[in-house]
Image (spheres, rainbow, N blue to C red):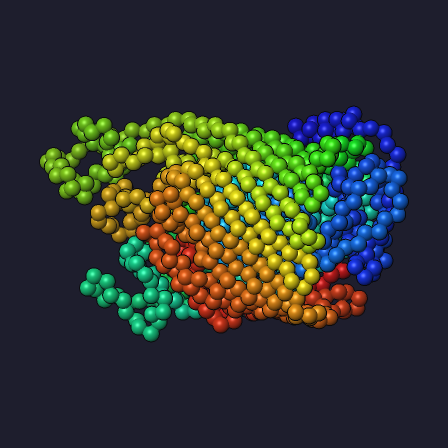
Amino acid sequence: MFKQSLISLSVSAVMLSTSAFAGELSGKVVDNNNLPISNANVHLHGKSQTIKTDDNGNFTIAVDAASELHVSKNNFIDQRLDVNPDSPFVTVTLTPSSIESIVVYASALHKSNMEMASPVTVLSGDKLKNSAKPTLGETLKDLPGINASYFGPVSSSPIIRGLDGPRVKITQNGLDSSDASRIGPDHANTNDALSAEQIEVLRGPATLLYGSGAIGGVVNVVDNRIPTDVVEAPQGAVDYSHDTNSNTNTVAALFEAGHNGFNFHFDGVKRKGGDYETPSFKLPGDHDEHHEDEHDHDHEEHGHDEHEGEEHTAEYAEKVDNTFIDSEVFNIGTSYVTDHITVGFSYGSIETDYGIPAHSHDHGHDHGHDHDHGHDDHGDEDAHGHDEENHNVFARVKQDRWQALFNYALHNNWLESIQVRAGYTDYEHAEIEAGMVGTVFKNETTELRTNFEHRIGEWHGIFGYHYSDSDYEAEGAEAFTPATNTTTHAFYVLEEREFGDFTLELGARVENYELTSRITETHIGHEDDHDEHGHDEHDHDHDHDHDHDHDHGHEETLVKTTQISDYTLDMTNVSASVGGVYTYAPGHNVAVSLSRSERAPLTAELLSNGLHIATSTYELGLGYHIEGTEIHFEPTDIEKETATNLDISFRRFIGDFGYTLNFFYNDIAGFYYQEKTNYFFTSEHGLEVADHEHEGARDVYQFVSQDAELYGLEFDVHYQINDVNRVKIFGDHLRAKLDNSQNLPRIPSNKLGINYGYEKGPFSADMTITRYLEQDEITSYETVTKGYTLVDASMSYDFAVQGIDMVGYLNLENLTDELGFVHSSFIKDQAPLPGRNVKLGVRAYF
């Protein structure tokens, strides 16, 4: 099917082509002082290939038809000019940008982050490599408006403006990551920052291209596993770093080569480390988890805790057990690149074992053991120190990912290019306890995205088709969601037009969403029970009898009824956006975007019905109703989640002083969230009203739908004091509540920070102080999270050894060894942030 699609698209492209005589455009790129700029990117719209300027700033590029030439380089303001095959020699002058300006690949319209109608944050280059963490959440969490779900540093997903999980789409080169990180917070995403060229965080109109799951934003990880430029000579890099806190060693490598348009790419990352250390903190007891209103994290000098007249010995820890990681990632790819055709394929493999803290299947926690995670053989019973007395759970993730790219640049004045991206992902996440596989999550995804880039009159844009098919299943003790198949078909369009200093951007997407599953309901009741609702499997015990005074004088016969039914949810989601950017002075603009997005519930939100050990809760989806002490599947009146989002951004990116200031308001009708019910669940007694508590009881949370609003701001202000000194102030503020004024749970703390940077010649250094404010805007079942301050510093030095460019870098993290708890984490009291860490690394380019 995929091959037929490629052939048909190629034939269509040739038929649509109009004959044109190709010409060569020569030019030079210079700065404001007329000095040449080397290694600038020169790109002709419609082509996937980018030409680099030489040491003298010169370039030559083939031009087949009237088109737009786009010249860019990081930290300069992009320039665009109209060209044709007869255009004479051109000189392009780039003006320095006071704020890092980077072309955003996920924008689809070749825009930089300073030109887009909606806010975009980009992390790239050495800054990305030096700050890369094992997960995307930890890598990005210091940026304004972005936080992390934090299930320990080895399982942490991005939160964008208080929205995470199914509302944040994580993509790799524009295609879904296709892991299970959207199912539960203990499931790590499968994107490694060290193998990325840049990571982009998008909000607003551009997210329409990526589906209804992008209602909160898109995190796009860009790498070069399928090379889109001609690689003229072998090149690569090697990186090694060591973290002292968790004794983690990380090795990364990159190699690329090419000949006559044929290219090869390889990258790999090997990471291995143990449990991470923290400042001393009090471990929550059983009663703390359910009833204590405020944990006293400063209570370090006392060894006792009082509860209901009984004295308990408080436990303290200086390490979070079961937070090791052992990971191997590699990607290989090949491509063939000409002026008009780019075709390529890639294969990626991930094999990762990582510990899941606070995840013990009701067996309790063993905080007194220091586990040895140095074993290479993970298949035996003692791998990672697990045995019959130690019930810690670790995850084993395996993913195989195939991708294909086809891009054809036409000899046509209105249809510039046709691009096809396709991917197939086979993902498996197994949770292993005492050497035994407990629960296995699997996901097979096939995805196809076709873009048609065009110019019609004064309009420039893309329209396209997006297909996705996902087969998800879970088996085992923690399989709280049934097997489902989710298929989407979508058509989308994104257009822009310039009116002098004002650029208008319009977008729309129509998506058919179909979810199918087989639902199994089991009811167990007494033979002589005439209650139409019956009883839950565990409701025949003595507690139920005492509550209702059922004394039959003999052992009753239980009747088990199992009902299996097929279920299909079929919805059409329509989303639209309008945005504009007004450049009122050189290097100054204001951007406004308004979008309305619809989203259908995902599997976990709709069909959850089971114990979720990671969050210590029993989860129910939107499709279930509780009647008495029985759970019934009655998926009536399932409504779409509809978000209306307004963004206003002010930017200055020229001269010594620059800033970005974003205001946003997001009104969400039918917001899906988990609400705490008046029930709890135990494996012995089943579902019961929470008027008293059994040992090991788990609160029951159910997904419900209610209107909500989220609003706030983000800012990032730079001032270049002189040639070597720079200061930056950044921060964010967020409020999130339901229409009844109840606060939404696990909303991240606001933050405010200041950064000082020094750069002279090959040496650079900086220091950042970030204050995370107290989070007291909480729900009735949350506890206040105290504020904390993190102090970080870094240094790097460029040097050469026998002609090889090298970079040595040193990161000092949490210098003051501050104790901090992450409010957005499900296990905030069991897993504080890491203590002081020294990261030492060296990188070589060849």
The quarter of the picture where the N terminus appears is top right
Side (left or right) of 536 relative to 111? left
- Up-down relation of residue 315 to residue 623 (above or below): below
| Residue in front for this viewpoint, 519 or 754 | 754
| Residue in front for this viewpoint, 713 or 306 | 713
Percent of width and height locating residue 694:
24, 50
- Residue at 52% x, 44% y: name it: 646
Side (left or right) of 767 relative to 387? right
| Residue in front for this viewpoint, 366 or 21 | 21
Residue 338 visible to an observer of this rendering: no
- Residue at 51% x, 48% y: name it: 664
- Residue at 69% x, 45% y: name it: 501
Percent of width and height locating residue 549:
12, 39
| Residue in front for this viewpoint, 213 or 398 | 213
Percent of width and height locating residue 764:
67, 69
Side (left or right) of 458 relative to 485? right
Q: Quadrant of residue 3?
A: top right
Residue 109 visible to an observer of this rendering: yes
